[in-house]
Amino acid sequence: MKFNKENLKWYGTTVGTLNINICDLNNGGKIIIVRDPKILDLDIRSKFWVSSYDKAQGVPHLMEHCLFSNVIDGKSIFKCQDELTRLGITLNAQTSYKDITLVANTASCMSVDKYPDDNIYSLLCSNYEYKILLKRLGDIHYNLVTTDVSSEYLEQEKGVIYGEMQNRYPGDAQSIRKIAEWSTLTGTKYSTIGNEFYLKNMTTDYINYMRLRTFLFENIKTIVISAPEFVNIDDILDIYVARLWEGLDINYKTINKDINKFSKEAIEFVDTYASPRFEPDQNSFLVRSIQAKYDNEHEESSYIYKVKSEKNSAIIKDVIINLPTIKINLDMLIENTAKTIAQIYIQSKLNEYYREKYPVTYGVSRYHNIWRYDRENYNTTSFIIELSADASSEKFMDSLVEFKKWVYNPEEVDNTIRSWDVTCKNNWYSFMNGEINQMNPLDSFDDINSIVLGTLTETAEDKINMLNQYSVEKNKLFPKALVDKFNYINNKKELIHKYVKTYIANWKVNIFDSTNLIEEDKDNKEF
């Protein structure tokens, strides 16, 4: 499909100092452009759907590594690193279990008109003028999405990933953290990193077809571009987006005309395991907790993962606590804030209890998973607790009984609500007085990020209309949307108390213990 910017209908607004423009793509994706006077660089994040499911666990991540075999003029990213440094360009890619993002960032982003009488600036601008940068990044991303990887480069990157696995998951020979825990977090057989078993037999046939199949117009999720205020939207579209589109169009034509160059096995593998979009298993807790209409009487049975013995395995004792799934959309933004406050309270109490009262962990982290099921958008939150090697997973399970009796304290829940209230107001004050997140401007205030990137089902117009509610009247600091939120939270404190109790009553506990071996692998003991 040829790129035609005339088919795009843009909606825009300004929140604080951020100028935000959004348009819908025919495939349901979005192009989002954020500009601000304080943004001094150019940042592009082009995200595409691809799944790391079942037999393809970790394979899209391997494909990500292989994309960089041709960055500039047939040179790999490491062979042209000096050139990229001189041009002020930083490249990266990020793969999750359900998508892949091409990331490009520049050291500066300039306009020839800003200091017209300064010769030194004009010379510097010859490398950092924004149209030049858009052209370079467009050419680079075109190369990434259209270049076949060689077998030599593929094998090289397999070795790099094996090293990455060992560094990120040292001693995880039983693939507990690499695979098993991700199934609990995602509700089925998904894993970004996978393990050596899934990668070792991958050939260029599989990887090159996966690249073609992934980087198509139909798989665009979001293209998010942040830039200085002087960068023109038409220039972004004419230079960067149009060039990326050329690459996507080449892939489309190759699949439709030359697909026989790939083996039937490669096509079936990619189309079966990497192309379908993420969805948890219907029998998983993520889906069951939507349908069950939980009340405070319900209690999920614990899941204990049994492992096989493996030489040179590290001792891993992890606990993942899944909270019941909640529905999300723009209309539920305030209500979901109340649920988030309840989650923050529970996390803080888990940290307090298992760091001080029953010290078995360094800390408790929180993991969010946003997904779509049966035409609705959902959010699942999980707490991850890495127990110390000498802790007993059985005693931890026993301690949860006492924790549930101890955790709910009405006064402390109210304190958490007050802390959220003060923090949110201070964050908004800072944002309205010019403080933005330079790395990711949409992260400058939580509500803005939630509205723009939280879900993709709302139209660009709906998102902008919601953002318009954050416009501020003259001589006022807080917009009506936030005033309504503060009033809701403070008038609905009893609802947050209910969420705390309901979450705790209905959560699911999952135990992953590398010493909990499958029965037939345990040594026989004589009595």
Image (spheres, helix red, strand yellow):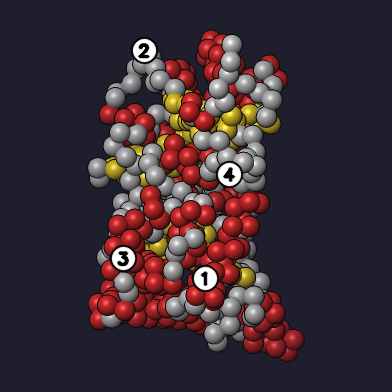
Separation of residues labelled 1 and 3 (CA atoms):
18 Å
Identify the residue under disc 2: 297
Contact, CB < 8 Å: mark 2 with mark 3?
no
Separation of residues labelled 2 and 4 (CA atoms):
39 Å
Q: Amino acid at mark 1?
A: Leu
Give the mark toward the camera: 2 or 3: 3
Identify the residue under disc 4: 173
Give the mark toward the camera: 1 or 3: 3
Separation of residues labelled 4 and 1 (CA atoms):
23 Å
State the SS at label 2: loop
* Disc 4 crowd, CA 10 A, few/some/many (<14, 14-19, 20+): some
Give the mark toward the camera: 2 or 1: 1
Residue 403 vertical position relative to residue 65 in the rendered view, above or below: above
Front-lying residue, 83 or 233: 83
Separation of residues labelled 2 and 1 (CA atoms):
53 Å
> Which circle's residue, 2 or 4, is located before the other in the chain?
4
Identify the residue under disc 1: 154
> Which circle's residue, 2 or 1, is located before the other in the chain?
1
Identify the residue under disc 3: 265
